[in-house]
Image: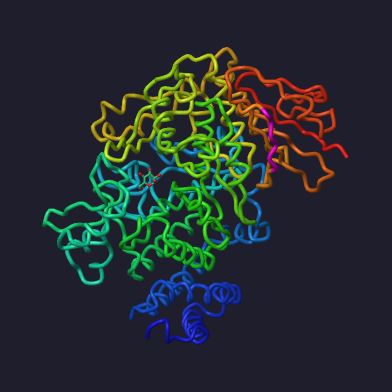
Amino acid sequence: MTLLDADAGVDEERILAAIEAEHGPDEDLRRRVGDQFARLHSLFGRLYGTRDDAFEQLAAVVAEAAASARARPADLRERDRALEADPGWFESERMVGGVCYVDRYAGTLAGVREQIPYFRELGLTYLHLMPLFESPEGDDDGGYAVSSYRRVDPRLGTMQELAELATDLRAAGISLVVDFIFNHTSDEHEWARRAVAGEEGYEDFYLIFPDREMPDLYERTTREIFPDDHAGSFIQLPDGRWIWSTFYHFQWDLNYANPAVFRAMAGEMLFLANQGVAALRMDAVAFIWKRIGTACESLPEAHLLLQAFNAVVRIAAPAMLFKSEAIVHPDEVIEFISPDECQLSYNPLQMALTWEALATRDARLLQQALDTRHDLPPGTAWATYVRGHDDIGWTFADEDAIQFGVVGGPHRRFLNDFYVRQALGSFARGVPFQENPRTGDARVTGTTASLAGVESGDAGGEDRVVLAHAIAMSTGGIPLIYLGDEVGQVNDYSYRERPDEAGDTRWVHRPYRPVGLYEQRHDPTTVAGRLFHRISRLIAVRAATPELGGNALIPFHVQDPGVLGYQRPGPTADDPRVLVLANVGDDPVTVEALTLSGLESGAVDLVTGAAVEIGAGIVLPAHGFVWLRVRALR
Ligand code: GLC
């Protein structure tokens, strides 16, 4: 039976009856399956409607979700209920994330557990552990080549320990986030081996072609993601066939046009959900559906797939969040964000434009992004960040930039040169990543401290580090800190001596936990001490400032192009609001009385706690900012 001739109502009853025959009656589960079934049925219809096996696969997915719901540990169910009753929990001003590699930051999962007191000291409520699954020996793209989603890399610990860590973190008020790397597996994954061997049921798990005919067609319009590794989107197997491989040659893209692949990955997702993971970072979402004649990025079916995964997880782990990792044009980034698709998304535009503003000493592109591209659907939030484990790509929209006479291509080249070539008096010590001489595309790597000028000894270095965090922490959403940045860790060039890392410059900004810097964190005579004090102060102030939660933002325009401005409103227009002013330039700037004349003169500087009179204007020091609680004049 194909889905197009099946009747959704009848199917649902049949599936529910089978589940209840196995598990006994369960009202709660019946309700959740009831809530999701019609949606899932319709999504499957649109994705797979014409395939003979569509109904069979749909029924299997729902049955697996139901079994997973039944197997869900009691404490996780309790948490589900609490979070379902508080659906905006992740939009709170108290949400702050940390990001780290298990091995580099803490050695093992047991080591991560030992860091919980530090995470609390810093004020974290969210912890993203970089990929920790079994993966090939040697180069594994930092764990993004997964060989088993159900086994933890044995050097780091076990799945049991991961579940225990999730419990301990939860007790400390910290939500655990891990990656769901579902666009591809490693070439050593069992599915990959079976597919290459042509085993029945697995032949179509990946996109394998006997010759260049289809690859040539696809590659007319696809983009090269890791050109240092291979040209185009395919790599050749030893037997001469070609297999789709968007990223490294050992990462093979799954074929989601096959519903058995959806079913298999949904099973892995449900398994992870029951380990106590609160949110999944949905890796490389833009790439999951391919169609000839397109870039094979951000296609409509990619959204349908995410919505289908979302419907499945609601049955078993109703409070689970998805965070979209779409590092693409801002028009496409926003498309992945909705309550029934990804509730969270990285904000790569704001991240890249913060660095753009620091380089140009001109905040207008960043201001424009906040003015026009910051809004989100209700029930969703940005994950803001100063930098992540990946390179910085200059993802702004050319059509936005040209409004200020800035031409995209040359401006991207300027930014890259500024950050990696130490040109034009640059304070930055970045390293180039995946420069593509054919397309001119280039990206930047480096820790926050190295990019901001701490490594080069620039006088503004520390202030820029704090300023960048002050922006990420005040625009709304969940700010993510790459752990180590809060103590000013600089680039680690030793990756060049490690053969498995030497070819990927992103390792320069994925250093080991800087034990010495952490020891200095309470010593104000050190860079680490000053940065730690200032950044942890921002986290604490933010947590006590409800206006900084949520996503509502009202632009506040200051004449000087070096000054970024916005207001974070209170519940009503009569309530106080928080005015943020940030100077990206190297000189002090006066924000004139006239600019501030719509506000009452008495304000409070939230960071210092001091009362300030703003009626006569205020001076922002070089790379300085204020978070002011103000009232509008009535
Ligand atoms: C994502 C990850 C990146 C990885 C790629 C392939 O972009 O952030 O580190 O290389 O996916 O999995």
- On the question of residue 317 being in view, the answer is yes
Query: Of residues 631 and 269, which is closer to you in this image?
Result: 631
Image quarter in which the N terminus is found = bottom left
Horizontally, residue 217 falls left or right of residue 479, namely: left
User: Which quadrant of the figure has residue 243?
Assistant: bottom left
Give the magenta-colored segment's residue range.
554-559
Residue 582: x, y in percent?
64, 28
Residue 326: x, y in percent?
45, 50
Horizontally, residue 86 falls left or right of residue 241, namely: right
In which quadrant of this rendering is ligand 1 seen?
Answer: top left
- Name the magenta segment's main secondary structure: loop
Whether residue 556 appears in magenta in the rendering, the answer is: yes
Q: Residue at x 42, y 43 (%)?
A: 130
Whether residue 75 appears in magenta in the rendering, the answer is: no
Q: Residue at x 43, y 71 (%)?
A: 64
When the figure is inspected, residue 415 is found, relative to residue 590, above or below; the finding is below
Residue 303: x, y in percent?
46, 62
- On the question of residue 115 being in view, the answer is no
Residue 248: x, y in percent?
27, 46
Query: Of residues 23 and 537, which is closer to you in this image?
Result: 537
Image quarter in which the C terminus is found = top right
When the figure is inspected, residue 211 is found, relative to residue 471, above or below; the finding is below
